[in-house]
Image (spheres, helix red, strand yellow):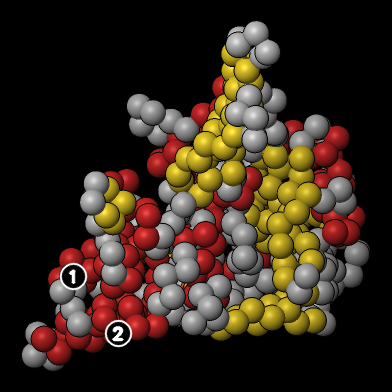
Amino acid sequence: MAETGTDIGAPAVLDRDGLDALVRALAARGRTVIGPTVRDGAVVLAEIDSGDRLPYGWGVELAAGRYRLRRRTDGAAFAHSAGPQSWKTYLHPERVRQWSADRAPDGGLTVTAGEGEGAARPSFAFIGVRPCDLRAIAVQDRVLAGGRHPDGVYRARRERAFIVAVECTEPGETCFCVSMGSGPAAENGYDLALTELTTADGGGDTDGRGDGEHRFLVRVGSEEGAAVLEEVAHRPADRPTAAAARDRVTEASRRMGRAMPPVDLRRLMGDSLDSAHWDDIAERCLSCGNCTLVCPTCFCTTTEDVTDLTGDHAERWRRWDSCFDLDFSFMHGGPVRSSVRSRHRQWMTHKLATWYDQFGSSGCVGCGRCVVWCPVGIDITEEAAEFHARARDAAGGRDGPGGDGRTGGGVPAAAAHRTDGGLP
Ligand code: SF4
Ligand code: SF4
């Protein structure tokens, strides 16, 4: 698990062949390499065996309730923002068999442990983890791997995971990581961090390879990251490449498609619990739970027991659940949150406010997935802005709750971007 807070060693440069070699080197170490690839009209996460499977030349067009692929002329591999899946698909899988039991003809019972109890555990390498998703993994680390009762499946997968982050140079129309303090620069939590520069970026090459080379600035965040980098062809980073990478990330931070209102979101949500705007949201919300399934920080699960027709074989499965499900809050006598209004309020206030009380941070990292994959286009930033406008009106036109709703210490991530330390 990458836990370093500062880069170690000098930054380097990989070309496209070098990135391919990196994928192969990680696979040769016995890791299951997961990266973005194009399938069924979307950039999805899947196992890849070479860098050629990456979505070179593909971008996306995003809007509330809309996702479309589009061709890019610069051949970039990582100029697409968050897709329908997040890394929790692999770290906190949708379904896990917790145990199974078999009854023998003589009545004897055999119980077989599931993954959480010592079965073979996968060793992943993730290629292309966005800064917002690095933050989301850190959030799930606190929820699932911390405390007195860590989740065995999550912790085992997380401890073995090798992370290759990719800084965002092409924010999506629905991204708002800057206002949540979670991007577009990668600060920590990675083994290696890439910043992609395409031929369109020009400049940056001092060793005769020619300006405008498609290349990746690499920063090293762990000892294993340094060891893996040593196995692939690379060269020391030159100052123009480092400067171009820094500029691209800084520029990306200025092109965010959306932003949360710049107020204390905890207080805004707390002051809006009785707002009539929840009724307006409830009229549009289908309570389908898509937003929770795509959200990289949502973690709720339920358990199901299944048996075969003979009753001689039984299994217990854990699967993702959603607070939008009516059964989610079922207690004696019925569900506690029986209305869509109450379920949507639970989800949004938990994400933006009460998550702090439970876990010490926001539950939202500004990835925009819930906006894109909501079938009716409900946009959490627009709803927060409406609550803010109503609070301001109620306060006689004065601004509502003051302060800074960002989670990242109030420092725009791009301002703290490090790319030139240790350059020759
Ligand atoms: S906000 Fe959208 S995605 Fe979430 S439950 Fe409602 S309709 Fe579904
Ligand atoms: S609430 Fe929406 S924008 Fe925030 S982390 Fe979850 S999916 Fe991303």
Tell me what residue is drawn at x 47 percent, y 65 percent. Answer: 289
Percent from the top left, x then y, of residue 314?
59, 29
Pick whichever of labels 2 and 1 is earlier in the sequence: 1
Q: Taking 100 as reference, is 309 above or below it?
A: below
Whether the residue under disc 1 has CB within 8 Å of ligand 1: no
Horizontal and vertical percent position of residue 274 = 15, 74
For residue 10, the mark is: none
Looking at the picture, how far across and down is residue 236, in whole percent? 77, 50
Eyeballing the image, is 28 above or below 38? above
Q: Which amino acid type is shown beneath numbered disc 2?
A: Asp
Element carrying mark 1: loop
Residue 126 drawn above or below residue 270: above
Residues marked 2 and 1 touching at CB (< 8 Å): no
Count up the numbered dots: 2
Left or right: 251 with respect to 377? right
Q: Is residue 236 visible?
A: no
Residue ID for mark 1: 273
Residue at mark 2: 280
